[in-house]
Amino acid sequence: MKSADEVLVASAQQGDRRAFEELVDRHKQKAYHIAFDFARDREEAKDLSQEAFLKAFMNLKNFDGRSGFYTWFYRILVNVCLDYKRRQKRAPSDEFDETVLNEAEPSHQPAKPVAPEQHVWAGQLSRKVDAALAALPPRQRTAFILKNHQGLSIREIATLMETAEGTVKVHLHRAVTSLRQSLAEFA
Amino acid sequence: MAELNHPISSPCRAFEEDLVLLHYGDLGGAERDTLQAHVPSCPGCSTYLRELAHLLPLTVKADEPTESFWLDYNRELRSKIDHAAKGSWAAKIADFLRVRWMPVFATAVVVALALTFTLGKGLWPSNNNSTEDEALLEALPVAENLEFFKSMDVLDNLDLLEYLSSQNNGNV
């Protein structure tokens, strides 16, 4: 029996735009959060996840269904995010968006009055984390984000990064070691 | 085997990589059992694990956009897809023309030129005149100059007459 995604993909491949929009609706939140983990910026995350959907739409004819739609799409998304990081490295920007930090508080938590010193501490931490993540070599950062933020297994990361599981473990360990050193003051 | 005599914040070097995996719950089998037996008795490794548990979640920046964000998201994406779809149709048409029709056009032009040069010779006005016309054209200037030559003959005759008259005067 076909999954809902498979049915939608089959319809979308026949040119049914509504079916593709349904696929977007099913996966956009996950896609956005993955992009946000890489970009750490709301607008960038929106653009990146939309770019991934656009690429999926343009290449849907080439999707052969050997893997699930989400697996296929996930790889497109991660590649888009990695390309973005590479582009960003060529044109670095150290701007820090305070509004994102304020908006970043999960909506399900009641709004609590935040002491000014806590605000300052959160700002320093966010800046430090951004800088520490940006300083990681791309493959270490990818392995770390996919593990720490996305909760993928080592095997899944290895498949996505097209490398051996042992290599992923090494990347992850080195990333954690670097971050631990960079964020020692917050430990 | 890694020993326990490290400073408090340093884990046993041999276990460091596995401790990261243990933190993420990605260590299985005998390695996990060994580490779980080791950690409670090792201040360095247990501190390291506590540090990871405190520090690594801080690197995650949560973001929960509002409903209006998602409405904008859908609208923007639909517009981008529309634009890309139109672009792709235009590109497909251009590709189709470029790939299939350019050789056809080129062949048609070559054939048309070949036909024009081979079959269409008589259809075009030519500068080549027939031999009769050429003879006439050659004769015309001659005819125009006939009077001149006649007058030249008269002059020649005058010379002759003068010569003859001078001869006659000498004889006289």
Image: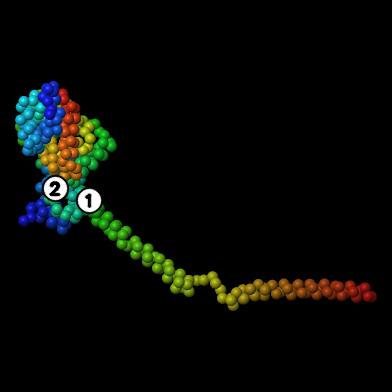
State the residue in front, B91 or B155: B91
Residue A143, picture quadrant: top left
**Which residue type carries mark 1?**
His
Q: Is residue B65 left or right of residue B130?
A: left
**Which residue type carries mark 2?**
Thr
Q: Is residue A97 visible?
A: no
Q: Is residue B48 left or right of residue A44?
A: left
CA neighbours of label 1 inside 10 A, class few (<14), some (14 to 19), many (20+): few
Residue A177, picture quadrant: top left
Chain ID of residue with mark 2: A
Q: Count the numbered circles shown.
A: 2
- The residue sitting at 39% across, 65% down in the picture is B109
Tag 1 residue? B83
- The residue sitting at 26% across, 57% down in the picture is B92
Chain ID of residue with mark 1: B
Residue B26, picture quadrant: top left
State the residue in front, B110 or B143: B110
B101 is higher (above) or lower (below) than B143: above
- The residue sitting at 59% across, 77% down in the picture is B132
Q: CA distance from mark 1 to mark 2?
A: 26 Å
A25 is higher (above) or lower (below) than A85: below
A19 is higher (above) or lower (below) than A169: below
Q: Quadrant of the N terminus of chain A?
A: bottom left
Tag 2 residue? A71
Tags 1 and 2 touching, CB below 8 Å: no
Measured as percent of width and height from the top left, residue A113 is found at 8, 27
User: Can you name the residue that lies furthest to the front here?
Assistant: B1
